[in-house]
Image: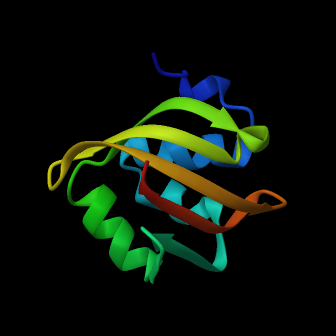
Amino acid sequence: MSIQVNRLADPTVRAFVTAVNAHDKPAFDAVLAPGATMADDGTDRDVADWADREIFSSNGHMDVESESDGGRALLVSYRNDTWGEMRTKWRFTVDGEKITRFETGQA
């Protein structure tokens, strides 16, 4: 059972998930702080390159299963055209209304 995106606790994380699921690159970019960083399975990646490959060019979609840490840690059933569907964990560092870092990996 997934959590409806509009019910996610943290509004900045909610905006991130909404942008991913709508494949809305301008909204995705807008929720990230300048110089935002990310890691995938413990390895730092270039955010723009990773997002294009894992989200926008491959129809990425997040179904949130649960959240913790005030909505800044998510357990997600993530799917895209490249890898199919997998359980992933996401952790967000938020400053004001911007995400400064996110980390994802298999759960």
Which residue is nearer to you in this view: 10 or 89?
Answer: 89
Across and down, in percent, residue 76 comes to 45, 39
Please tell me which residue is depicted at 76% across the width and 60% down the height of the picture: 94
Q: Is residue 10 something that shows in the picture?
A: no
Q: Is residue 99 above or below residue 81?
A: below
Outermost top residue: 1
Across and down, in percent, residue 84 comes to 17, 45
Q: Quadrant of residue 82?
A: bottom left
Q: Is residue 53 above or below residue 20?
A: below
Q: Is residue 96 above or below residue 38?
A: above
Please tell me which residue is depicted at 55% across the width and 22% down the height of the picture: 3
Q: Is residue 75 above or below residue 44?
A: above
Which residue is nearer to you in this view: 26 or 71?
Answer: 71
Outermost front residue: 107
Across and down, in percent, residue 95 comes to 81, 64
Q: Quadrant of residue 62?
A: top left
Across and down, in percent, residue 45 comes to 43, 81
Quadrant location of the N terminus?
A: top left
Which residue is nearer to you in this view: 93 or 35?
Answer: 93
